[in-house]
Amino acid sequence: MKVIVVGSSHGGFETVRGILAEKPDTEIQWYEKGDFISFLSCGMQLYLEGVVKDVNAVRYATPEQMRAQGVNVFVHQEVTSINPDEHTVVVHNLDDDSTREEKYDKLVLSAGAVPAKIPVPGGDLKNVYAMRGRDWAIKLKEKTVDPDVQNVTVVGAGYIGIEAAEVFSKAGKHVTLIDILPRPLALYLDQEFTDVLSKTLKDHNIYLATGQTVKSFNGEDGQVTAVKTDQAEYPSDLVIETAGIKPNTDWLKGTLDLTDKGLVKVNDHQETSQPDIYAVGDSTKVPFAPTGKELQIALATNARRQGRIAAKNVLGDDMKMPAVSGSSALSVFDYHFASTGIKEGTSAANGVLSQSVFVTDTTQPPFVPNEAGNQKVYFKLTFDPGNHRILGAQIMSKRDVTANMNAISLAVQAKMTLDDLAYADFFFQPGFDRPWNIMNVAAQKALQTLA
Ligand code: FAD
């Protein structure tokens, strides 16, 4: 059997890895249109802050390693079209500009996404950057040490925007963070958390321009000099656009069924509308555990799971993609936070009636001093007030307690209730935590609220 895999990031890599793990003698052709395989944008902040020194280390695999396992790796070669009836693809070799046809028995697409461009004048000015992939990583790194760059404006205060703002604040630049929503990280955390983080961002010389709409990027001599919003104008030597993504699927229009946002429609086996063609990763939706509906959640974790499911089904298994909770974690300077499932702020958009309880505690018993790691912890649990089902949670502390969100993610996936969580067994040791884990405490408080 000959399998063609398109895209070398998380989804493509996991598909290839999954096939190799179960049937290493499968003929695999793996295509990447860039000149580098399996770069991890997830590791970009570590590189930009100098924790990881070599940009080329931010990857899972090299072509040589994969070729040694029998994979035919094609770098700088773009798959430009598919003929599903003939089971062929057209490949454009970007080195010598030649094209050729390749036959497949099974085809897996992990074409991913590109950063969205805000549709305002000036987007093509010099020094308007994005933050995704190795090429942008290299360009951004140069700007962290460029003395001509003093004012950096980041547009979009989601995960990636926060990472960009932190990188350039640590590099000594004056950073403005703009978002159309009234709070940073508004889709990940409720206000109890973002109030604390907003103060932290301001304390690190990051000016928050939230609740503002970008109207234009202004420039002189072809280079950006300012970002104009509906409320103010911000001097900018560098602009980083981190306001969402656009699926890399224009080339699939007319061949595969796409959603109105251009995502590839897949079933629970990662199969597309055409036989023997699978799709995974950021250009698809995933089943969302709290609602059972499909949702766009662009995370490497999801791409990896989908890639493994696709690999199994390509090899003849019959495996469904499990529902996911959209769990994610991030550090913002001294704070570490994580969230999973539905929040108060995302409840309505998901068509869910929810209620939440917010609790604060210390990570350890009061007698343990701060120097030994005892820190304030913020926790919010969201649930269905009718059937008590747990729908999601958020946690934050200067101590890393983010792994609690994995427990809540499981609870959401397993459709557990407040009654299950209130007395669930979690370990206690004063060096780590308290006799009642904060997840118990919150569930008990929620039950009292409902009584
Ligand atoms: P992509 O990563 O978009 O890659 C698609 C690849 O396919 C690209 O290399 C592209 O060149 C190639 N390609 C596309 N079309 C073709 C074609 N026609 N022919 C050949 N090649 C093609 N997620 C997390 O879970 N945790 C994190 O901490 C995290 N941090 C992130 C930080 C940043 C800065 C960014 C930008 C993203 C982060 N993510 C994180 C999200 C994660 O990177 C994505 O969810 C993941 O990369 C999606 O993988 P993918 O395979 O769908 O596609």
Image (tube, grey):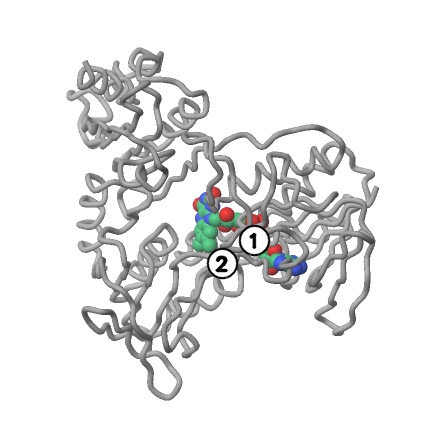
**Image position, residue 174 (x, y; %):** 25, 66
- Distance of label 1 from label 2 (alpha carbons): 9 Å
At label 1, the amino acid type is Gly
Against 167, is 446 above or below? Answer: above
**Image position, residue 42 (x, y; %):** 47, 49
Residue 246's tag is 2
Q: What residue appears at the point 66 percent right and 52 percent down from the top-left corner? A: 62
Against 83, is 390 above or below? Answer: above
Instruction: Give the mark, 1 or 2, whose residue is nearer the N terminus.
Output: 1
Q: What residue appears at the point 32 percent right and 31 percent down from the top-left corner? A: 393
Q: Is mark 1 within 8 Å of ligand 1?
A: yes
Against 306, is 447 above or below? Answer: above
Side of 121 where 306 appears, left or right: right
Q: Quadrant of residue 383?
A: top left
**Image position, residue 262 (x, y; %):** 54, 55
SS at circle 1: loop
The answer to whether any part of residue 58 appears in the image is no
Q: Quadrant of residue 408?
A: top left
At label 2, the amino acid type is Lys
Residue 449's tag is none
Query: Which residue is more in the foreground, 235 or 363?
Result: 235
